[in-house]
Each structure stands twice: as C-alpha cells, then as structure tokens.
Amino acid sequence: MRWEAVIGIEVHVQLKTVSKMFTRVAYRYGAPPNTLTNPVVLGLPGTLPVLNRAAVERAIQVGLILGCEIPPECKWDRKNYFYPDMSKNYQISQYDQPLCVGGSVEIELPGPSRNVMGEHRRIQLTRIHLEEDVAKSTHFGDYSLIDFNRAGCPLIEIVSEPEIHSAEEAAAYLNALRMNLSFAGISDCDMEKGQLRCDANISIRPEGSNELFKRTEVKNLNSVSGVRAALEFERRRQREVVEAGGTVAQETRHWNELQGYSVALRSKEEAHDYRYFPDPDLMPVRIGNDLLEQLRKNLPEMPFDKQRRYIDEYGLPFTVTSVICRNRGLSLFFEEALAHCERPRELANFVVNDLRREMAAAGIDSPSESRISARQLAALVRLIDEGTISKQSGQDVFTEIFESGGDVAEIIDEKGLRQSTDSAEIELICKTVIDDHAKPAAQFRSGKEGAINFLKGQVMRLTRGKADPAKVDQILRSLLRQ
C-alpha cells in the first residue's frame, strides 16, 4: 500500500517590539540571564498585565500579509499548565476568538534546476493568535536552569491546515514564512536565536484517502533542515508501525537532532487539558477599519509579488530576482538605483554579484551599512553604458567606492580608467598583437572562432583595460580578414 503524509505545522514567531507583551520590560537577545524581568514577568501576586499596542498591530500586519480575516473583536484567555518555564502557571493566549482567522501562505517548491522557477501553491491557515512567550529552559543532566529574559515577549502562533504532504513542502512553507515576515520587518525570524520555532503534527494515511489518522507532534525543531529530517524520519517510523500491524500512538515526541531520531515524551494534550478560560484582567480588543487600512498602507510589496513584477516589467531572469526579492535591503537599493538609471539588467547584475560579494567580505547584512549609495551605482552603470569605461574597470571602481566612498567620475580620472576611443591608436596596437602572436591569428583565420579571445586579451592588457572591448573585437576581425 502507498502511504501519504498529512502534516500541519504550528509556527511561533517572536515579534520585533521594544517591550514585552504585557509590561514595559525590554527584550534583547543575549542579555545576561534573568536581567530582563519584573514582577509582571515573574507572575508575582498583585501584578496586572498592560497590553502592548505595537504587538497587536504587528500581529494584525501578519494577518494582512497572509490574507487572513481580521475579526472586529478578539479576547484573551488563560492557558493553564504547570511547568517551570511559566512561573504563574498559566500563559496569556487566545483560544476561541483569535486575532486572525484563515489566510494562506504562498510557497515555492524546488524547480527542475536552480535556474528555473518551481511550482507555486498555497498552504491554507487555520488561525493566527497572539500570546506571551515562555522562559527558556536549559537542561544539564539531572538538573535544569531557567532564564526568564524571554518570558513575556510578544509571540504569534501561526497554525496551518493539515495539507502539507512532504518534508520538502514543509521546508518550503517555513522558508516562505521566514522570508515574508523578515522582509516586512515583523521579526528577524532567526531560528538559532529562538525567534522562530515550530512544532509539526504528522500522520499517515492510504494514498487517496481523506480520513485523518492519529498524529504525533514533533517538538524541538530549531532549523529548517531539522524539520525536513524529523518529518521524514517520523513518516518512515509511522509507516513501519502500521505495516507491522501496530497502531500509531497520539503523542508528543522529542526530535534528537544530533542522533537523527525522535523519542516519545508524553501523550498528546487536547485543548480541554489546558482548561482555557477568559483572562479576567484583560478586556477584549476591538479593531476598527481605520486601523486596518492604516496598517495595510504601511506594508511593503511582498517578495513573490515583487519577483513576478521584476520578471514582467524589467525582463530580469529568475535567478537574479530570486536573490534580490528575498532581501529587502537589496531590493530597495536596486529600485533606488533604477530611479536614476533605467538599465535594470546591468544594475541587477551589479547588485547580485558585486554588491553581495563585497557585503559578504565586509561581514555586513545591508547595503545601507556600506559606503556605496544607489545613486553612485547608477552613475557607474551609466558611464559603462556610454562607453566611458569598460565593464571590467567598472567593477574595480565599484570595489573602490564600496570600501572608501567617493565620486565615481573623480575615481575614474584619478585611476586613468577612461576608455580610449582613438580608433587609429587601437588599430596600431591590434596590428602589433597580430604580428607578435601569429599562431592564434592563424587559428582564427582557419575557422577557430575562440582564438580571437586570446588576441583581445592581449590588446586589453597593452591598453590597461582602457580600450573599448567592442571596438577591439571589430578592429581585430577586420584586420584578420585582410
């Protein structure tokens, strides 16, 4: 029998806000343990929560990005459980009236090659709700330590419908979420820092069946590769259990990333196990249309939409757009440069190749951290297009500007990089090269087209890159045919 995996994913995303969800205490990754706390965070008696408006607005923006319905009212509930990472023994969350309902995530599956766009489809969402994060537990053999710095941070939980059917689709789903939310500035989505965490629910069923079987929930998934590996392992394990005549237990399992297997933790909880009830200290939140329109206007164009536009309007290839459109800093830099120079292909190539190379070497994440501006790149591309300097010299100028700044034209003059347009001078040098290199000249005359590249290289070397490559090619061919 052929088996099909049925997967639903719960993704927790820390929102990028100045303070925590229900108190003014700040949060930043890497602070000394238990230094970002107060009586509210620790749940001491007599404390009362105060709602963080910015967190609500950012969560609504996520809903708008993903096409969710934003109900006119949501409320807060207490999710009761007893565990050291929540000192007051309940988490403020949302149960039956979440902030966002429905929606979907557009994913891109791998194409037949790296140069070809893969299939796009949508994974439907059940809901998105807002809650407070819990403390971080670190286990050392027979004892554990708790750091409450993370406790109380604004956290959204994005719950998908069970319509993911492979580990590859699950990875594409997580990558799409990370891309959209980081692009919009909602969260940095750094999984290593715990800013995006997920649990995966997986079951198997006979291929073609619509029945949902008992599922397991896999926890401790802290990387996209870990999600892919855990789901593939769990699919095989469940299939072996069923084919051996057994029954898959509905349970929560821990993924051991180092060893590459999952182990049972406990039986799977249901909603009633948490004994949800409305939080008596927080009023429901009403969301007006004016606020929704204001938040919608502040959203950037999303990466997949931007990519389709770049391909349609500018004729850029998929390989280029898939790089620029996934990084907001690169796309803003490209569009600003395009406003000063309508040469999209040339600008995009500089951004994808030269700019990214120099950024990586400098250890920076955004063009705004460098000394080169979009206006400078536009000026450089115009000069190359006009034939003032060669493309090779342009790359050298780019590196100079990236490192030290400066005016493009001044750098070109200081380094003596302006191309020679004197046809008589170039022709004289071409004749010298042909006389000095009779063998490649003879090879070209006998039909070996590639032999001319050696001769062109020699001319460019003698002119120190100042000759126009197109003019060199033209003159060489004319002389060789005589």
Image (tube, helix red, strand yellow):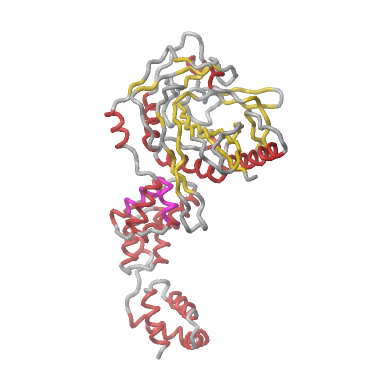
Boundaries of the magenta span: 319-337
Residue at coordinates 34% horizontally, 38% vertically from top-left?
299
Q: Nearer the viewer, residue 468 or 264?
A: 264
Q: Which quadrant holds residue 346?
A: bottom left
Q: Position of residue 312 (x, y in %)?
A: 34, 56
Task: State which quarter of the image contains the N terminus.
Answer: top right
Q: Position of residue 89 (x, y in %)?
A: 55, 15
Q: Position of residue 362 (x, y in %)?
A: 48, 49
**Number of marks in the rendered image:** 0
Task: State which quarter of the image contains the C terminus.
Answer: bottom left
Query: Looking at the picture, does residue 330 appear above or below residue 93?
Result: below
Q: Position of residue 206 (x, y in %)?
A: 60, 41
Residue at coordinates 61% horizontally, 25% vertically from top-left?
268
Q: Is residue 329 magenta?
A: yes
In the visual, does 448 lie left or right of 338?
Answer: right
Query: Looking at the picture, does residue 465 appear above or below residue 64?
Result: below
Q: Main SS of the magenta segment? A: helix
Residue 370 visible, this orientation = no
Residue 136 visible, this orientation = yes
Q: Is residue 284 magenta?
A: no
Seen from this angle, which residue lies furthest bottom? 482
